[in-house]
Amino acid sequence: MAAYIPVPRDLTRVKSKILFNLTKRQLLCFGLAALIGVPSFFLIRRSGNISMAAVCMIVIMMPFFLLGMYERDGQPLEKIAKQFIEAKFVRPCVRPYQTNNYYAVLIRQAQAEKEVNRIVFSDKSVSKDRTKNPNPSKKSE
């Protein structure tokens, strides 16, 4: 029976592996995790609790592992996090762009004409009342 090896169709997604089937990025992140995690284990172990020291070392090393391994749509974790922070916190959520709709312009124009007519015709009725009674504070007898 022949063994088949899957070959990716898109060779641009294939990354070169250097050591232990890991990329340069993964090796760098794992090295930094070991450089920070192992000394922290020995420092915390001095307190006497080895299991607590191991858990703390894992917690300290986990962000480096995530940076090295996680990738979505060809983008590493820090690019995804940067885009998320910009979208949620840096840029405003409300976009002030408004289209100049022709029908909305016609409606605003009609409303403005109605308001002008209301003001003009109400002023004429007030001016007619004032010609009859020039001083509105005094009642006519």
Image (spheres, grey):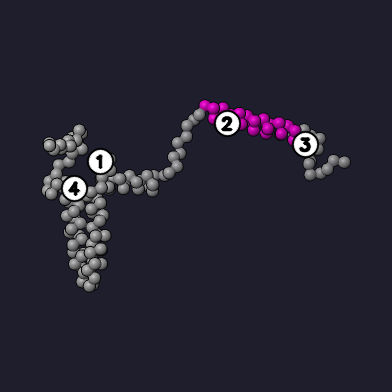
In the rendered structure, which disc, 3 or 4, sits on the residue that comes first in sequence?
4
Q: Earlier in the sequence, mark 4 or mark 2?
A: 4
Q: Nearer the viewer, mark 1 or mark 3?
A: 1
Of pointers 2 and 1, the one earlier in the residue sequence: 1
Q: Is residue 62 visible?
A: yes
Secondary element at image label 2: helix
Q: Earlier in the sequence, mark 2 or mark 3?
A: 2
Magenta stretch: dominant SS? helix
Instruction: Name the residue rendered at 77%, 33% in the picture.
Output: 128
Q: Tell me the CA gap for discs 1 and 3.
A: 79 Å
Secondary structure under tag 4 reads: helix
Residue denoted by label 4 = 25
Give the left or right position of residue 87, taking residue 141 as reference. left
Residue hosting label 3? 130
| Spatial separation of the CA atoms under disc 3 and disc 4 | 87 Å
User: Which is more foreground, mark 2 or mark 1?
Assistant: 1
Location of the C terminus by quadrant is: top right
Image side of residue 66 versus residue 92, left or right = left
The residue singled out by tag 2 in the image is: 108
The crowd level at tag 4 (other Cα within 10 Å; few <14, some 14-19, many 20+) is: some
Distance from the alpha carbon under mark 2 to that under mark 3: 33 Å
Q: Marks 1 and 3: CB-CB under 8 Å?
A: no
